[in-house]
Amino acid sequence: MNKRSLEQCETPALILDEAKMERNIARMQSKLRSLDVAFRPHAKTNKCIDVTRRLMQTPEGPLTVSTLREADYFAEHGVKDILYAVCIAPNKLDHVIALRQKGVKLTIILDSLDAAQMVVDRARASQQDFDVMIEIDSDGHRSGVQPDAPELTEIGLLLHAAGVNVAGVLTHAGSSYDCNTTDQIRERAEQERIAVVGSAERLRAVGIPCPVVSVGSTPTALFAEHLDGVTEVRTGVFVFFDLVMAGLDVCRVEEIALSVLGTVIGHQNDKGWTIIDAGWMAMSRDRGTARQPVDQGYGVVCDVDGQPLEDFILIGANQEHGIIAHRSGSGSTVPHLKVGTQVRILPNHACSTAAQYGHYNVLGRDHEITAAWQRFSGW
Amino acid sequence: MNKRSLEQCETPALILDEAKMERNIARMQSKLRSLDVAFRPHAKTNKCIDVTRRLMQTPEGPLTVSTLREADYFAEHGVKDILYAVCIAPNKLDHVIALRQKGVKLTIILDSLDAAQMVVDRARASQQDFDVMIEIDSDGHRSGVQPDAPELTEIGLLLHAAGVNVAGVLTHAGSSYDCNTTDQIRERAEQERIAVVGSAERLRAVGIPCPVVSVGSTPTALFAEHLDGVTEVRTGVFVFFDLVMAGLDVCRVEEIALSVLGTVIGHQNDKGWTIIDAGWMAMSRDRGTARQPVDQGYGVVCDVDGQPLEDFILIGANQEHGIIAHRSGSGSTVPHLKVGTQVRILPNHACSTAAQYGHYNVLGRDHEITAAWQRFSGW
């Protein structure tokens, strides 16, 4: 495509600052090298081959996905080693088999005897092999077997005895998103490591090799002091970062690579409001910073060059309307952002904001849009 | 497509109950006939030609849209009379001109002298006509000129003197979504009517014909006692309804036509949690009922036939995980929804949940999926 300036973009539009993204990727890769673990990046944030190719160790993977639609798409783009990191539902096993028959080493996960029995039954009935990992609950935030539960070895033995490959154990320290300090994140990283390494040891003690020991969350990966016993890390949101990560001190606001370009379309002067054409459809409804010490509303308002306008915040959103106001307590006068002025809004949560768009407008070092990278949504 | 049962669907999937949708459409059309106003349905909720054709009075419109992407799509499907009901940004005027040159009667809106001047300048520079409506603020919730502000007639006269067609005035009583009783909704409907009819009269008093007087919100349209002086109504969410509308007593929960089909993938028995494969990506992050008397979490849980399971609620959501729990205060024991069981979740907000999907799975009267209706997203 021909290069064009931001001013030539119809709004709203999703802007990806390539240089910031590259620095974020380099930071994660460097950290994981220092921890001496393999990287199986998570594609759920970006859902785009152009971004994912920059993350993966080889064009064939390894890769983590959150949907089988992602597995289909990346398989079509040559990725061969894929972990589908959401516990399997029986209605997806035919799809899993179809992908494996195309030559994809697709690993599935589960955390219950019921699901393990279904996989065993399907493996027998269809004469298919499956690669299975067992999800471990390291922090009580969602899914997974407790590391000390009898069910862990029961699941492992049920699968192993039936000839289903138990590839390993994995966990996700989602509670790290609720930390208040980086010291707390460091503690969660150690808790995550202990839970999954201990689980692998329990499985090995009953004769299941359990080669892969996998952890994954951007905060814990970047703050872990060591990952002894862990073999791979799965992270995704680091590639763009967002206001939730900045609120956790995992990144600085200036490192957020993703923003939404919007345009001023009106004002309510008596209220001090500036109305823009980026509402919740453009930002998503995600208000992840609402539970952090600094609530960033629907997003931090920047000028078109990406410099934060410190006194402004996107306080409200209708479907296609965003409302910019002064931060509470500010003594400023009515903002002087004229109709037609472009602004860039930094998102609460990169995964949910990116999901609202069909492509990234890639912003090059010369502050021009240099490419449109397609992304996909759905299942 | 061949008919298939819900049990044959991969999950999550968006389900549209066709019979419920048809009853919702009939209700709105009947109400608007009794009010003796034209109907310019809003496509922003459904973004699908198969749904929109069932709403419009003719295959050529009239229609309301929230983005120019919608205008493009519906124009490609033969719609000729389209109102783009978000205040225009200058970077969109070339797109507007392109659509008009294709034969679409595309009306734009604005609410400021600055925007009016930009439209006048562009009309002169490009030798193009524009049809413009002036947005009126009837309730202080978002955009629009105050009905009694000097700017209203100044905008009208600026456009009119330059030969730009002032097609009329419009408003949206968005604050009706925050009412507590249907009596309050009735009052908001009258407030909405008075604001826009009075604005039209002020414009006519200075010599601007102002033929169209347009209102639009599902609650006010369904509860207005009369719409004297109003010529058209724009509503959209009524076609599906949702939990926010049910919380307002605008519809009953049983009338909600849209649901998300999910599957149980695990449990945390000590917490009483059931984990499903429909998280916030499947439901959206919209928590519209959080500010209503009954907070419905991320959605009301139903069985696969759509019958609410009264004791359950989707209390939490990660990207691809939903957490079902007992409603607060319930003395029930751990839910017995086995791994593999399908559930249907009614959404907080139809507009935001539908936006997460590429198609509707249309559920026919025989409880089978009879069609896949494509929908689109983005700008």
Image (spheres, coloured by chain):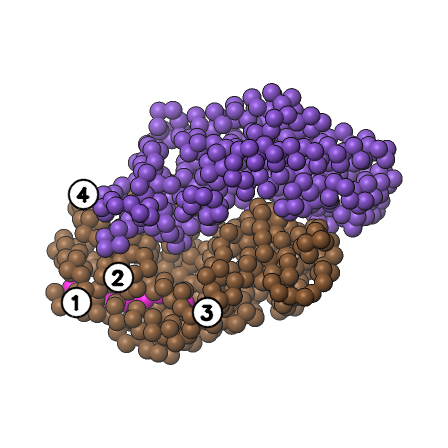
Chain colours: A brown, B purple
Counting from the top left corner in percent of width and height, residue A246 is at 50, 68
Q: Which residue is mark 1?
A: A202
Contact flag, marks 1 and 4 (Cβ < 8 Å): no
Q: CA distance from mark 2 to mark 4?
A: 28 Å
First in sequence: mark 2 or mark 3?
A: 2
**Residue appearing at x 57%, y 23% in the figure:** B31
- Please tell me whether mark 1 sits on a helix, a strand or a loop: helix
Dot 4: within a 10 Å radius of its alpha carbon, few (fewer than 14), some, or many (20 or more) residues? few
* Along the viewing direction, whichever of A235 and B187 lies nearer the viewer: B187
Q: Amino acid at mark 3?
A: Leu
**Residue appearing at x 64%, y 32% in the figure:** B190
Res A333 visible: yes
Between tags 1 and 4, which lies in front?
1
Quadrant for the N terminus of chain B, please. top left
Image side of residue A227 versus residue B77, left or right: left
Q: CA distance from mark 1 to mark 2?
A: 12 Å
First in sequence: mark 3 or mark 1?
A: 1
Image side of residue A100 versus residue A272, left or right: left
